[in-house]
Amino acid sequence: MKDETKLVHGHRGPKMERLDVRTVNPSIQRGSTYLYDSIDHLREAKAKAVDLGIASYGIGGGDITLHFQDAFCAIENGFRGVAVNSGLLACTLPLMALLQHGDHLLMVDSVYGPVRTFCDGYLPRMGVSVTYYDPLATLDELDALTTDTTRVVYLETPGSLTFEMQDIPAIAAWAQDRGIRTIIDNTWATGLYFKPLDHGIDISTHAATKYMCGHSDVISGAIVCNKETALAVEATRDQLGLAMPPDEAYLGLRGLRTMAVRLPVHWQNGLKLASYLAGREEVSNVLHPAMEQDPGYAIWSRDFTGASGLFSVVMRSDLSWEQLNVFLGALKLYGLGYSWGGFESLCVLQSPKTVRTGSQWPRPGIGAGYVLRFHAGLEDADDLIDDVEQAFTAMKKA
Ligand SMILES: Cc1ncc(COP(=O)(O)O)c(C=O)c1O
């Protein structure tokens, strides 16, 4: 069965007790306490919960959380889905699960900022050391950074600010040979356009906040584990009490129903907008791996089946912060904001070189100007382009 069908057809509601009909969607059952008919029933239910990888009282989120987990896990061919309260937690929980005192982590230098903050703040307190590696590092370069205690290599592809593509199958095979676990932040592609576990990755994480939920009204995270890592991730979730509550799980499942029809519009709108921007004299580089001129295009077209609506452009280096502020202020259809993956377009000013420690930015061939990150929403692409055009005109006049 195709992913599109899986997302629409599974996960129906339970039979209603008195009407004997079911709803299209499973219900939200809010509850801290689960009631059992007898001690035998309690024992059975507890054993069932262990099999399902969920707590046997309200802290587990209940049936709807299991539905959401199963739905996103199925499209990535995972062993177990684990739903949590934020995309940030989806990235950090697997690190907490797989690393212990004395271990070493190889972390991609283009990682989402708050994960870097976690690696610099929390992990050293737990006795874990971290080395940042260039997202374009060769396997030899990774070897040179590896120590006897390296246990995990973490990828984010493409990097959600600067859009470098990593050779995921090659890194996964390299790590497997050395007994090192791999985690990837797969939020950009979603499980519809890239399936990390099929390429040898152990854990795929998502800010479900973005395309899965898709409406800019939920913060949530999704983790897809293989058989070897699922128990550790679930145990750490339960030790910390971090399962997803029912309302968020309901909205996650609802978002997944339409993800396959939303994503192609984000993808095409993003490409049209990026192509327009590539022709503007104010822009020195477009960073979008699904465009043929991008250095990451070969990997993207080999491994991915689609693209989302998020990409960046590097502005000409003589354009000042003030000029770009005028540009941003003149945009009418783009919100100025950090999250992405909702139905609306966004644009935000970034400065990647201030955070990098394991790689050079700008890299050779890329201008030294400010980086503008665009999220192409579900509006009409020509309207989005017209709006950018009038903002450039406003910037010139200022
Ligand atoms: C690539 C990436 N991963 C993870 C996250 C974290 O998601 P959340 O906002 O749900 O914590 C974000 C948020 O912007 C992100 O861009």
Image (cartoon, helix red, strand yellow):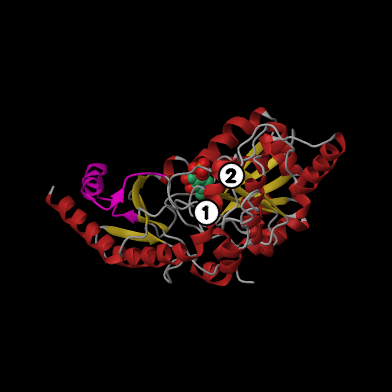
Q: Nearer the viewer, mark 2 or mark 1?
A: 2
| Residue 12, percent from left and from top | 61, 57
Q: Examine the rendering and report whether any part of residue 208 can be seen.
A: no
Dot 1 amino acid type: Arg
Residue at screen point 66% across, 63% down: 170
Q: Can you say whether 305 is above or below 134 in the image?
A: below
Is 333 magenta? The answer is yes
Q: Which mark is residue 28?
A: 2
Q: Which residue is mark 1?
A: 254
Left or right? Give the position of 169 relative to 332: right
Q: Examine the rendering and report whether any part of residue 32 can be seen.
A: yes
Residue at screen point 56% across, 53% down: 253
| Residue 199, percent from left and from top | 67, 64
Q: Which mark is residue 225?
A: none
Q: Are marks 2 and 1 in contact (CB under 8 Å)?
A: no
Left or right? Give the position of 65 relative to 304: right
Mark 1 C-beta to ligand 1 under 8 Å: no
**Residues in magenta?**
314-338
Instruction: Report the quarter where the N terminus lies.
Output: bottom right
- Label 1: few (<14), some or many (≥20) within 10 Å? some
| Residue 37, percent from left and from top | 80, 37
Dot 2 amino acid type: Ile
Mark 2 C-beta to ligand 1 under 8 Å: no
Where on the picture, by quarter, is residue 79? bottom right
Q: Nearer the viewer, residue 139 or 299?
A: 299
Q: Work out which residue is located at the far front of the displayed protein and give it.
A: 18
